[in-house]
Protein backbone atom coordinates (compact mmCIF):
# COMPACT_ATOMS: atom_id res chain seq x y z
CA UNK A 1 0.00 0.00 0.00
CA UNK A 2 1.48 3.34 -1.04
CA UNK A 3 1.15 6.16 1.49
CA UNK A 4 0.09 9.64 0.45
CA UNK A 5 3.58 10.89 1.23
CA UNK A 6 4.97 8.88 -1.67
CA UNK A 7 2.44 10.34 -4.08
CA UNK A 8 1.97 13.92 -2.95
CA UNK A 9 4.38 16.58 -1.75
CA UNK A 10 2.07 17.52 1.06
CA UNK A 11 -1.20 16.35 2.53
CA UNK A 12 -4.18 18.31 1.30
CA UNK A 13 -6.52 18.44 4.24
CA UNK A 14 -9.31 20.93 4.84
CA UNK A 15 -11.54 21.07 7.87
CA UNK A 16 -15.25 21.78 7.70
CA UNK A 17 -16.58 24.40 10.10
CA UNK A 18 -18.20 23.17 13.29
CA UNK A 19 -21.29 25.21 14.02
CA UNK A 20 -22.76 25.97 17.41
CA UNK A 21 -25.94 24.17 16.49
CA UNK A 22 -26.97 21.56 13.95
CA UNK A 23 -27.56 23.21 10.56
CA UNK A 24 -31.01 22.68 9.08
CA UNK A 25 -31.32 21.34 5.51
CA UNK A 26 -27.56 21.72 4.77
CA UNK A 27 -26.10 21.47 1.29
CA UNK A 28 -23.76 18.56 0.71
CA UNK A 29 -20.06 19.50 0.94
CA UNK A 30 -19.22 16.50 -1.26
CA UNK A 31 -20.20 16.36 -4.93
CA UNK A 32 -22.55 13.53 -5.87
CA UNK A 33 -24.30 13.28 -2.51
CA UNK A 34 -27.86 14.46 -1.83
CA UNK A 35 -28.39 17.43 0.47
CA UNK A 36 -29.34 16.96 4.10
CA UNK A 37 -32.84 17.24 5.51
CA UNK A 38 -33.78 18.66 8.88
CA UNK A 39 -33.52 18.19 11.76
CA UNK A 40 -36.93 19.27 13.01
CA UNK A 41 -35.76 19.67 16.60
CA UNK A 42 -33.34 18.10 19.08
CA UNK A 43 -32.20 14.77 17.64
CA UNK A 44 -32.67 11.81 19.95
CA UNK A 45 -31.44 8.28 19.21
CA UNK A 46 -32.35 5.41 21.53
CA UNK A 47 -31.54 1.71 21.40
CA UNK A 48 -34.71 -0.04 22.49
CA UNK A 49 -33.33 -3.57 22.23
CA UNK A 50 -31.18 -5.20 23.32
CA UNK A 51 -31.18 -3.56 26.73
CA UNK A 52 -28.23 -2.67 28.93
CA UNK A 53 -26.54 -5.72 30.50
CA UNK A 54 -29.17 -8.03 29.00
CA UNK A 55 -28.11 -11.67 28.70
CA UNK A 56 -29.59 -13.19 25.55
CA UNK A 57 -30.00 -16.97 25.96
CA UNK A 58 -27.83 -19.28 23.90
CA UNK A 59 -30.10 -21.37 21.66
CA UNK A 60 -30.41 -25.09 22.24
CA UNK A 61 -29.48 -27.44 19.42
CA UNK A 62 -32.36 -29.18 17.69
CA UNK A 63 -32.37 -32.96 17.77
CA UNK A 64 -30.02 -34.36 15.18
CA UNK A 65 -28.73 -30.91 14.22
CA UNK A 66 -25.27 -29.40 14.80
CA UNK A 67 -24.75 -27.01 17.69
CA UNK A 68 -25.79 -23.44 16.88
CA UNK A 69 -23.05 -21.00 15.91
CA UNK A 70 -24.73 -18.03 17.52
CA UNK A 71 -27.89 -16.52 18.92
CA UNK A 72 -30.45 -14.43 17.09
CA UNK A 73 -30.27 -10.81 18.22
CA UNK A 74 -32.89 -8.27 17.21
CA UNK A 75 -31.91 -4.60 17.31
CA UNK A 76 -34.55 -1.89 17.55
CA UNK A 77 -33.91 1.84 17.67
CA UNK A 78 -36.01 4.99 17.75
CA UNK A 79 -35.01 8.28 16.16
CA UNK A 80 -36.68 11.59 16.92
CA UNK A 81 -36.61 14.76 14.78
CA UNK A 82 -34.31 13.29 12.13
CA UNK A 83 -35.54 11.93 8.81
CA UNK A 84 -33.90 8.86 7.34
CA UNK A 85 -34.16 8.49 3.57
CA UNK A 86 -32.37 6.92 0.60
CA UNK A 87 -32.07 8.91 -2.61
CA UNK A 88 -32.95 6.72 -5.60
CA UNK A 89 -30.59 8.49 -7.99
CA UNK A 90 -27.46 8.21 -5.85
CA UNK A 91 -28.28 5.34 -3.51
CA UNK A 92 -27.26 7.53 -0.59
CA UNK A 93 -29.15 9.32 2.14
CA UNK A 94 -29.56 10.06 5.81
CA UNK A 95 -29.34 6.97 7.95
CA UNK A 96 -28.66 5.36 11.30
CA UNK A 97 -25.11 4.07 11.64
CA UNK A 98 -24.51 0.99 13.79
CA UNK A 99 -21.10 -0.02 15.12
CA UNK A 100 -20.81 -3.46 16.71
CA UNK A 101 -17.66 -4.23 18.69
CA UNK A 102 -15.74 -1.63 16.69
CA UNK A 103 -17.02 -2.84 13.30
CA UNK A 104 -18.89 -0.36 11.13
CA UNK A 105 -22.05 -1.91 9.67
CA UNK A 106 -23.91 -0.94 6.47
CA UNK A 107 -26.17 2.11 6.56
CA UNK A 108 -29.60 1.54 8.12
CA UNK A 109 -32.41 3.41 6.40
CA UNK A 110 -35.58 1.52 7.35
CA UNK A 111 -35.47 1.81 11.12
CA UNK A 112 -39.16 0.94 11.40
CA UNK A 113 -37.98 -2.65 10.87
CA UNK A 114 -35.57 -4.38 13.28
CA UNK A 115 -31.95 -5.07 12.37
CA UNK A 116 -31.38 -8.82 12.73
CA UNK A 117 -28.14 -10.54 13.64
CA UNK A 118 -28.96 -14.19 12.88
CA UNK A 119 -25.99 -15.70 14.74
CA UNK A 120 -24.34 -13.41 17.27
CA UNK A 121 -21.28 -15.08 18.85
CA UNK A 122 -21.19 -15.95 22.52
CA UNK A 123 -19.92 -13.31 24.95
CA UNK A 124 -20.13 -9.59 25.69
CA UNK A 125 -20.87 -7.12 22.88
CA UNK A 126 -21.15 -3.34 22.59
CA UNK A 127 -23.50 -1.75 20.08
CA UNK A 128 -23.34 1.95 19.20
CA UNK A 129 -25.90 3.92 17.18
CA UNK A 130 -25.86 7.44 15.79
CA UNK A 131 -27.26 9.27 12.77
CA UNK A 132 -25.40 10.57 9.73
CA UNK A 133 -25.95 12.85 6.78
CA UNK A 134 -25.71 11.29 3.28
CA UNK A 135 -22.00 12.20 3.14
CA UNK A 136 -21.36 10.32 6.44
CA UNK A 137 -21.13 13.34 8.74
CA UNK A 138 -22.61 12.61 12.17
CA UNK A 139 -25.15 14.80 13.90
CA UNK A 140 -23.30 16.27 16.87
CA UNK A 141 -25.92 16.55 19.58
CA UNK A 142 -25.87 15.10 23.07
CA UNK A 143 -28.94 12.96 22.43
CA UNK A 144 -27.94 11.79 18.96
CA UNK A 145 -25.69 8.94 20.13
CA UNK A 146 -26.71 5.76 21.93
CA UNK A 147 -24.74 2.83 23.31
CA UNK A 148 -25.59 -0.49 24.90
CA UNK A 149 -23.45 -3.35 26.18
CA UNK A 150 -25.19 -6.73 26.26
CA UNK A 151 -24.26 -10.40 26.43
CA UNK A 152 -25.00 -13.54 24.44
CA UNK A 153 -25.06 -16.74 26.46
CA UNK A 154 -22.65 -15.44 29.08
CA UNK A 155 -20.67 -12.46 30.30
CA UNK A 156 -16.98 -12.65 29.47
CA UNK A 157 -15.59 -9.67 31.34
CA UNK A 158 -15.26 -7.20 28.47
CA UNK A 159 -15.79 -3.58 29.58
CA UNK A 160 -19.13 -1.88 29.09
CA UNK A 161 -19.39 1.38 27.16
CA UNK A 162 -19.51 4.30 29.59
CA UNK A 163 -20.80 7.61 28.21
CA UNK A 164 -18.82 9.43 30.92
CA UNK A 165 -15.49 7.96 29.79
CA UNK A 166 -13.61 9.41 26.80
CA UNK A 167 -14.46 7.41 23.69
CA UNK A 168 -14.05 7.84 19.94
CA UNK A 169 -16.15 6.08 17.32
CA UNK A 170 -15.29 6.03 13.62
CA UNK A 171 -18.11 7.17 11.33
CA UNK A 172 -16.27 7.10 8.00
CA UNK A 173 -14.87 6.72 5.46
CA UNK A 174 -15.72 3.09 4.84
CA UNK A 175 -16.54 0.78 1.94
CA UNK A 176 -15.56 1.52 -1.65
CA UNK A 177 -15.20 4.80 -3.53
CA UNK A 178 -14.85 5.35 -7.26
CA UNK A 179 -11.72 7.20 -8.35
CA UNK A 180 -13.87 10.19 -9.31
CA UNK A 181 -15.26 10.33 -5.76
CA UNK A 182 -11.81 10.27 -4.18
CA UNK A 183 -11.11 13.92 -4.93
CA UNK A 184 -12.83 14.68 -1.62
CA UNK A 185 -13.46 11.99 1.00
CA UNK A 186 -14.88 12.93 4.37
CA UNK A 187 -13.29 11.64 7.59
CA UNK A 188 -15.52 11.85 10.64
CA UNK A 189 -15.61 10.50 14.19
CA UNK A 190 -18.00 10.73 17.11
CA UNK A 191 -16.48 11.77 20.44
CA UNK A 192 -18.14 11.14 23.79
CA UNK A 193 -17.00 11.64 27.37
CA UNK A 194 -14.72 14.63 26.75
CA UNK A 195 -14.69 17.97 24.98
CA UNK A 196 -12.31 18.42 22.08
CA UNK A 197 -9.96 21.38 22.33
CA UNK A 198 -6.32 22.50 22.26
CA UNK A 199 -3.70 20.92 24.51
CA UNK A 200 -3.44 24.21 26.39
CA UNK A 201 -6.82 23.34 27.92
CA UNK A 202 -6.08 20.77 30.63
CA UNK A 203 -9.63 19.42 30.50
CA UNK A 204 -9.78 19.01 26.73
CA UNK A 205 -8.86 16.04 24.58
CA UNK A 206 -7.41 16.01 21.07
CA UNK A 207 -8.17 13.77 18.10
CA UNK A 208 -4.99 12.22 16.71
CA UNK A 209 -5.12 10.14 13.54
CA UNK A 210 -2.84 8.57 10.97
CA UNK A 211 -3.88 7.62 7.44
CA UNK A 212 -1.86 4.67 6.13
CA UNK A 213 1.79 5.47 6.94
CA UNK A 214 1.44 9.21 6.50
CA UNK A 215 2.48 11.65 9.22
CA UNK A 216 -0.14 11.80 11.94
CA UNK A 217 -2.50 14.75 12.26
CA UNK A 218 -3.98 16.37 15.34
CA UNK A 219 -7.46 17.90 15.39
CA UNK A 220 -8.31 20.32 18.18
CA UNK A 221 -11.91 20.91 17.12
CA UNK A 222 -14.60 18.27 16.82
CA UNK A 223 -15.37 18.59 13.13
CA UNK A 224 -15.01 16.46 10.01
CA UNK A 225 -11.91 16.68 7.84
CA UNK A 226 -11.65 16.34 4.08
CA UNK A 227 -9.03 14.05 2.57
CA UNK A 228 -8.27 15.22 -0.96
CA UNK A 229 -7.05 13.27 -3.99
CA UNK A 230 -6.94 9.89 -2.29
CA UNK A 231 -5.11 7.43 -4.58
CA UNK A 232 -6.50 4.17 -5.90
CA UNK A 233 -5.99 1.26 -3.53
CA UNK A 234 -6.86 0.01 -0.07
CA UNK A 235 -6.44 2.39 2.84
CA UNK A 236 -6.53 2.16 6.62
CA UNK A 237 -6.47 4.72 9.39
CA UNK A 238 -6.06 4.79 13.15
CA UNK A 239 -7.57 7.41 15.45
CA UNK A 240 -7.17 7.97 19.19
CA UNK A 241 -7.95 10.48 21.90
CA UNK A 242 -5.09 12.28 23.64
CA UNK A 243 -4.80 14.58 26.63
CA UNK A 244 -1.65 16.44 27.69
CA UNK A 245 0.23 14.76 24.81
CA UNK A 246 -0.55 11.29 26.16
CA UNK A 247 -3.00 8.79 24.76
CA UNK A 248 -6.06 8.41 26.94
CA UNK A 249 -6.11 4.88 28.31
CA UNK A 250 -9.78 3.97 28.10
CA UNK A 251 -11.49 0.92 26.57
CA UNK A 252 -13.05 2.82 23.65
CA UNK A 253 -10.57 5.69 23.14
CA UNK A 254 -8.79 4.03 20.20
CA UNK A 255 -10.36 2.97 16.90
CA UNK A 256 -9.59 2.25 13.27
CA UNK A 257 -11.23 2.18 9.85
CA UNK A 258 -10.75 0.85 6.33
CA UNK A 259 -11.82 1.88 2.84
CA UNK A 260 -10.85 1.38 -0.79
CA UNK A 261 -10.63 3.59 -3.87
CA UNK A 262 -11.29 1.64 -7.09
CA UNK A 263 -10.19 2.62 -10.60
CA UNK A 264 -13.24 1.83 -12.69
CA UNK A 265 -16.67 3.07 -13.73
CA UNK A 266 -18.58 0.60 -11.59
CA UNK A 267 -20.57 1.86 -8.63
CA UNK A 268 -18.96 1.24 -5.24
CA UNK A 269 -20.11 -1.85 -3.40
CA UNK A 270 -22.23 -1.41 -0.32
CA UNK A 271 -19.97 -1.41 2.73
CA UNK A 272 -20.13 -4.57 4.76
CA UNK A 273 -19.09 -5.43 8.27
CA UNK A 274 -15.36 -6.26 8.19
CA UNK A 275 -13.93 -9.07 10.22
CA UNK A 276 -13.03 -8.12 13.75
CA UNK A 277 -9.69 -6.31 13.38
CA UNK A 278 -6.66 -6.82 15.53
CA UNK A 279 -6.03 -4.13 18.11
CA UNK A 280 -4.49 -1.17 16.27
CA UNK A 281 -1.24 0.44 17.29
CA UNK A 282 -1.92 3.88 18.69
CA UNK A 283 -0.51 6.96 17.00
CA UNK A 284 2.53 8.36 18.76
CA UNK A 285 2.11 11.21 21.20
CA UNK A 286 1.88 14.56 19.43
CA UNK A 287 5.02 16.67 19.48
CA UNK A 288 5.08 19.48 21.99
CA UNK A 289 4.31 22.11 19.38
CA UNK A 290 1.30 23.68 17.78
CA UNK A 291 -0.79 20.97 16.10
CA UNK A 292 -0.97 21.01 12.31
CA UNK A 293 -3.86 22.90 10.80
CA UNK A 294 -6.83 20.78 9.86
Image (cartoon, rainbow, N blue to C red):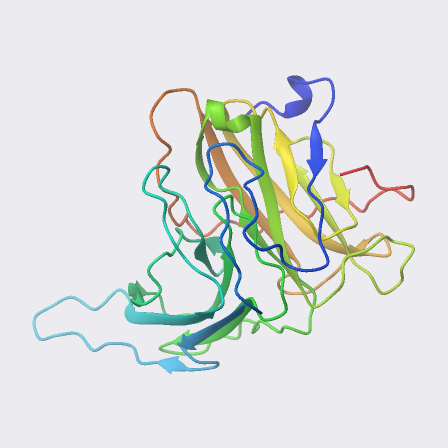
Q: Quadrant of the N terminus?
A: top right
228 on left or right of 196: left
Q: How far from the left and from the top, in percent, is residue 288?
A: 91, 44
Which residue reaches farthest left? 64
Image height check: is 209 above or below 240?
A: above
Q: Depth check: 17 or 244 in front?
A: 17
Using the image, determine if residue 66 lies above or below residue 197.
Answer: below
Residue 102 visible (yes or no): no
Q: Position of residue 82 (x, y in %)?
A: 48, 63
Q: Quadrant of residue 144?
A: bottom right
Query: Is 111 situated above or below 31?
Result: below
* Quarter location, residue 162: bottom right
What residue sits 66% from the left and 59% below the top? Answer: 253
Where is residue 292 drawn, in percent x and y?
Answer: 82, 37
Q: Residue at x 45, y 78 (%)?
A: 155
The image quadrant where one finds the C terminus is top right
Which residue occupies 31% across, 71% down?
74
In which quarter of the view is residue 121 placed?
bottom left
Amino acid sequence: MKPFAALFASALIATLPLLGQTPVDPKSPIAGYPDGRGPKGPVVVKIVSPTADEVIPWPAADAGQPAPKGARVEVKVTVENFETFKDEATGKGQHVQLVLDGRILPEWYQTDKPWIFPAMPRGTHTLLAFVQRPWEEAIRESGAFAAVTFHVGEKNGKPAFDMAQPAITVGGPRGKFKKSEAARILFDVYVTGCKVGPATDANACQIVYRLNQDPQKTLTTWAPAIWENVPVGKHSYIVALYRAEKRIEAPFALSQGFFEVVDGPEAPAAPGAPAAPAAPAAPAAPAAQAPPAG
